[in-house]
Image (cartoon, grey):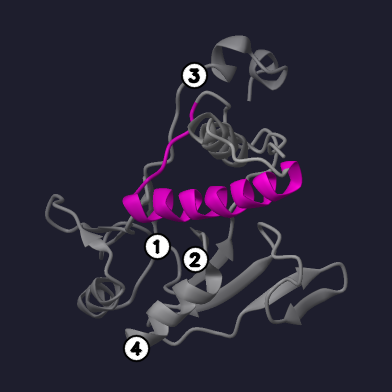
Amino acid sequence: MSPKAGRGDPGLASLDVKVEVIVIAVSDVDRAKRFYQGLGWRLDQTPPGIVQFTPHGSACSVQFGEQLTSATPGSATAYLVVSDIEAARDALVSAGVEVGPVFHVTPDGPADGLDPERRSYVSRATFRDPDGNTWLMQEITTRLPGRVEGDLTSYRSATDLADALRRAAAAHGAHEERTGERDDNWPDWYATYLVAEKSGATLPE
């Protein structure tokens, strides 16, 4: 890295770059293809020799193929984001995927079950593909401050947006209980809540 870039070059700081694809190593392409199709991930059109899948609601895809990487099959570890870890786990198990139990991270290490406070980034569950590549699902509903640019509030799928609206509805109900008044301006309140939750800003009360 050049000294200029190391100091945080302003040109690079504003450069729009998005992660497009993660390449994983597999020992049997056809077997891996069947597994990821079984997850319900979208099979994308690609050049010969490349198999690409995209999870529902994801902007980033996964690729594998016989000549794509020299990594050891099964050596990859990646994170998946879900808004409801229990619902996601149940759906995968129903589809025949072996998924580990839900656990949450603590200062002393992993602990069984959901995080008691249902905090974002804390509750998790793991599954692996036939080669042992690890996918660690983590439940995220509210982003940490600075993780999402405030003017880039977007949802990757109708399911993602619907879940966010349900959380906003519950929070707005609590808001009306606190004030003791019906809030006829609920659309603005919802909008503020959705943007704040996505960007990690302070949620409205």
Region of the chain picked out in magenta, as a range = 152-179
Q: Is residue 167 magenta?
A: yes
Magenta stretch prevailing secondary structure: helix
- Image position of 89 with respect to 159: above or below: below
Can you tell which of label 1 and label 4 is closer to the viewer? 4
| Pointer 2 with pointer 1, Cβ within 8 A | yes
Above or below, comparing residue 47 to residue 42 in the picture? above
Residue occupied by mark 1: 24
Image depth: mark 3 or mark 4 in front: 4
Q: CA distance from mark 2 to mark 3?
A: 28 Å
- In the rendering, which numbered label is found on residue 15? 3
When asked about the image quadrant of residue 140, the answer is bottom right
Q: Report how far apart the C-alphas of labels 2 and 4 lie in the structure.
A: 22 Å
Question: Horizontal and vertical percent for residue 48?
Answer: 12, 55
Type of residue at label 4?
Gly
**Label 3, label 4: how far apart the Cα atoms are:** 42 Å
Check disc 3: other Cα within 10 Å, few if <14, some if 14-19, many if 20+.
few
Asked if labels 4 and 2 touch by Cβ distance under 8 angstroms, the answer is no
Q: Amino acid at mark 1?
A: Ile
Q: Position of residue 70 (x, y in %)?
A: 40, 61
Label at residue 96: 4
Give the label on residue 147, or none: none
Which residue shows up at 72% across the image and 17% down it?
7
Q: What kind of residue is marked 2?
A: Ala
**Which label sits in the foreground, 1 or 3?**
3
Please, what secondary structure does the residue beneath circle 1 have?
loop
Mark 4 or mark 2, which is nearer the start of the sequence? 2
Asked if residue 107 can be seen in this view, the reply is: yes
Q: Which mark is residue 76?
A: 2
For residue 133, say whether it is visible. Answer: no
**Mark 1 or mark 4: whose residue is earlier in sequence:** 1
Residue at far right of view:
108
